[in-house]
Amino acid sequence: MLTQQQIEQYRQQAFEMFTRKANLVITPDERGRIEIADFGLSDFKATGLGVLVYVNTDRCCAKELVMWPRQTCPEHLHPTIGNVPGKEETFRCRAGKVWLYVSGDSMKNPSCRPPTGREKTYMVWHEIELNPGQQYTIYPDTPHWFQSGDDGAVISEFSTRSTDDQDLFTDADIARFTRIAAA
Amino acid sequence: MLTQQQIEQYRQQAFEMFTRKANLVITPDERGRIEIADFGLSDFKATGLGVLVYVNTDRCCAKELVMWPRQTCPEHLHPTIGNVPGKEETFRCRAGKVWLYVSGDSMKNPSCRPPTGREKTYMVWHEIELNPGQQYTIYPDTPHWFQSGDDGAVISEFSTRSTDDQDLFTDADIARFTRIAAA
């Protein structure tokens, strides 16, 4: 588990990547709100990311994401529950590089490898490369994961309401969020 | 009416403001899609703005806005129609300065004056100042207008689906969009 000291250290690094790599202006209050997420796997540099939520209302959400070099956000989907459509999100690369993997035709020689020891929890291999200025929209119920390039990445996310507690992860060990048994 | 040559000239200026003032990375295709809007008033430097739509799906939308010095986006609202809530939008200032006016307690000495000759079409005077890193969310059915500072502004807009044709303007001369008679 991340210590408070580690969280503060990563938060400072996240702030520097946001402001220096992507030239974002972030207030002191926002700096203190940067979430350092390790998804409960206690291996932050391999599986994790930094998140700054600008706004999250009942209807829409905007965030900035920051990833350390070759860091992975693990495979998950945003489920439709009853007649409420799952979260829809657009990722726009602002700095660095990110490879996004979704369901669909698999890439024969993918650019990324999953974090060591967790390979079996990565099932979708349709690869999309995003460089600064490029973006991709993921619709509900679509499994996806992503990994940054050798210099890390800063990514804007525009979406419907963010409901992290509803996310379904392929990796059963992921304990960041409450898993929904039936969705 | 703006000539094609003027549109191209303003589009180039918008691109430069996006990339130099706010350090945004914009693709050549996106550069060509920057909308130069004069709201049909043929006085672009006073009433108008530049708009780059990143994404606009059925459920959410993200744009970058650019304003020339002391330019105004005229007073309007996003109406709820039947049981469909109107557009909700968050403005986040990225560079420069913008004053936003919404319904509520009026500012006694506001920082902005409406464009000359159009004063009577500006009815709401509750002032919110946004500097880089500051943001404000406007909910449906709320009249609002905004004006940039002496150096112009770059503003990110995160919102529900953008339906410009439903916007209701206070100024009856505004012909950019079809006005909805009953809403």
Image (cartoon, coloured by chain):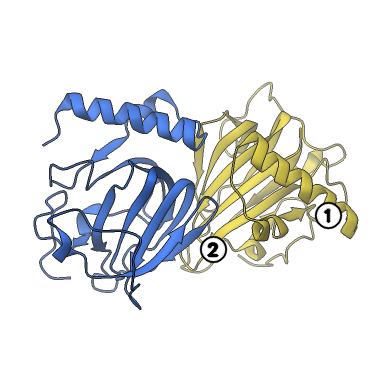
Chain colours: A blue, B yellow
User: In what quadrant of the picture does the C terminus of chain B appear?
Assistant: bottom right
Kindly identify the amino acid type of the residue bearing the numbered disc 1: Ile
Q: Is residue B24 left or right of residue A109?
A: right
Is the residue A103 above or below the residue B61 in the image? below
| Residue A58 in the image, given as x and y percentages of width and height | 36, 53
At 69% from the left and 67% from the top, the residue drawn is B181
Asked where in the image residue B70 lies, by quadrant, the reply is top right
Q: Which residue is mark 2?
A: B56
Residue plotted at (76% across, 53% down): B36
At x 82%, y 40%, the residue is B46
What amino acid does circle 2 point to? Asn
Which chain contains the residue that carries disc 2? B
The location of residue B33, given as percent across then percent down, is 69, 60
Look at mark 1 in the image and give the residue it sits on. B7
Q: Chain of mark 1?
A: B
- Assign the N terminus of chain B to one quadrant of the image: bottom right
In the displayed structure, A143 sits above or below B125; it is below
| Left or right placement of residue B61 versus residue A6 in this view | right
Q: Residue at x 41, y 56 (%)?
A: A159
Furthest residue toward bottom: A105
Q: Quadrant of residue A178?
A: bottom left
